[in-house]
Image: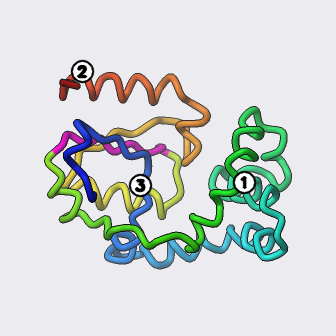
Amino acid sequence: MRRPDLFRSAVHHEPLLIPLLFETPGGSVAFADRRENFGPVVGAMQEGRTEASIYRFIEAVFELQSGSAETEAAAPMWRDNARTIALEFGSAEPPLPMTCAALSDAKMPTLVVQGAMTFPAFSIMSEKLVHCLPKATMDGVDHDGPYRRQDDLAKMISGFLAVVGTK
């Protein structure tokens, strides 16, 4: 948003655009439903258990059973990035407003992807964004699409780049 001149194209997977969510009927209910699942994340953060907080976060977002994130193949990567979990919960500099109008100002080809089985909150934000940007859907996944189906996402992105060019 600050330097669109640095990008030739952009790909967003289920973008987190909370202002768009609240502009949509039912958006506040969908947001409350998702936030309710983050209690264990916040609890672990408040107790200073950073590694546990990233696992609880992954479980909430990917709809995994409690305690199962540690057994996933990506667990070492998530653990290595645990220090970033505080950024998700407001301890970082506030981002620029990501509204449809603001995103439309970026004159670059942009692709929005969502999982066909994703949470209503993620779907609402992606669907709202569709009014200003193109969108693609990954069948059979929720917000874990890029993790579970890397090849499918790579094909979507490659197809998008073939159409818009990467010069």
Specify the quadrant of the image occupied by residue 39.
bottom right
* Amino acid type indicated by mark 1: Glu
Helix, strand or loop under label 2 = helix
Image position of 150 (left or right of 6): right
The first of marks 3 and 2 along the sequence is 3
C-beta proximity under 8 Å, tags 3 and 2? no
Viewer-closest of 53 and 5: 5
Which residue has dot 3 on it? Answer: 15
Question: Which range of residues does the magenta coloring cover?
Answer: 108-116
**Which quarter of the figure is the C terminus placed in?**
top left
Mark 3 → mark 2, Cα distance in angstroms: 22 Å
Residue 162 image label: 2
Q: Position of residue 78 (x, y in %)?
A: 70, 45
Comparing marks 2 and 1, which lies closer to the viewer?
2
The first of marks 2 and 1 along the sequence is 1
C-beta proximity under 8 Å, tags 2 and 1? no
The first of marks 1 and 3 along the sequence is 3
* Amino acid type indicated by mark 3: Pro
Helix, strand or loop under label 3 = loop
**Which quarter of the figure is the N terminus placed in?**
bottom left
Q: Position of residue 35 (x, y in %)?
A: 61, 72
Which residue has dot 1 on it? Answer: 59
